[in-house]
Amino acid sequence: MKRRTFLKSTTQAGVAAGIGVFAIGCNETQKNDEKTKKPMVKPGEIAICTWGFSKANETAGLALQNGKNALDAVIDGVSVEEENLKNTTVGKGGAPDREGRVTLDACVMAPNGNAGAVVCVENITNVARLARKVMEETPHVMLAGEGAEQFAYTQGFKKENLMTEASQEAYQEWLKEKEYKPIINIENHDTIGMLTLDKNGDIAGACTTSGLAYKMMGRVGDSPIIGSGLYVDNEVGGAAGTGLGEEIMKKVGSFLIVELMRNGMSPQQACEAAVMRTVKTAKNLSDFQIAYIAINKAGETGSFSLQQGFAMMEYRNGTNTRKEAAFHLKTE
Ligand code: GLY
């Protein structure tokens, strides 16, 4: 199938599926209401995240079901991956830069429009939690490098060596060739971006990553940049991005998606439109991956990626489901 044709069919299918599910959901709820005279179920207690981070997403979903608010739940969720030593793209165990330093980036957004971020932080595992501290305990939105690390210690975070035996071994192996390709393997589990909708209908988000493996020292991607890796507007919805941060930043992708939803697009349509902005201008499309997830106030969700191979986790009604995303380029 030609690429254009493929996109058209997936787009229509994706939108049709999204509308269909929502319409069926409404009709069923109405029928149930008539039978039981109970009030309509409000959308809520939904968590979505990038890639197959099942445990992280379930943790957030369960936290919502147990009455936690959207912000508390999203931090609980992404912390699972930050602490997962086997994850080489987030938190402790994340791949280092070319000099062998593990530097982490993260941001959070709260339903009240507040935001916090940290970039290029060493020796701290839970950087999303640290970003929240920046948001709540400082007059700033973003702290970088040593300043962020020192602030973490004042807030009770402990100093940890983020390099594991496995990441040290992989780094030593990389040093032999020192080959640097700023390409994110489309099979690789990259950044975790997560969005939560709580029972009050409030939306929060978090995004956390170690960024590109063997990046240049000081390189920062999209993940901690408000509007690029993450954006939440509690009146409209939220979006998160993953993949090659340089391409997401150039389009301020997550902000774009929320604005498109504000203007009437569904989360699915908005994610597709954001990927297509990159398709219009980027070179060597087959060499990198970008993907987005989004949720709106009605609890509708969407996801779309440049390349085949991206999936979103969705926790809804107590069930955690992996949803393969529609995409633009089929893997040859
Ligand atoms: N999306 C993660 C990064 O580019 O750093």
Image (cartoon, rainbow, N blue to C red):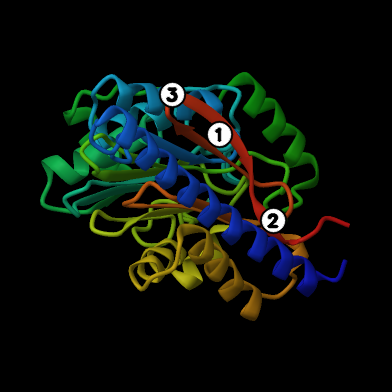
At numbered mark 1, what does the secondary structure look like: helix, strand or loop? loop
Q: CA distance from mark 3 to mark 2?
A: 36 Å
Among numbered discs 3 and 1, the one appearing first in the sequence: 1
Query: For mark 2, what is the residue?
Result: 183
Callout 2 environment at 10 Å: few (<14), some (14 to 19), or many (20+)?
some
User: Which circle, 3 or 2, is nearer the viewer?
Assistant: 3
Please determine whether, in this image, residue 203 is positioned above or below residue 52. below
- What residue is rendered at 33% in x and 41% in y? 43
Kind of residue sitting beneath label 1: Gly
For residue 153, which quarter of the picture?
Answer: top left
Q: Residue furthest bottom?
A: 281
Kind of residue sitting beneath label 3: Gly
Position of residue 297 measured from the top left corner of the image (x, y, whole percent):
31, 52
Query: For mark 3, what is the residue?
Result: 318
At numbered mark 2, what does the secondary structure look like: helix, strand or loop? loop
Question: Is 210 displayed left or right of 39 in the figure?
Answer: right
Among numbered discs 3 and 2, the one appearing first in the sequence: 2
Tag shown at residue 94: 1
Among numbered discs 1 and 2, the one appearing first in the sequence: 1
Question: Is 239 displayed left or right of 102 in the figure?
Answer: left
- What residue is rendered at 44% in x and 51% in y? 223
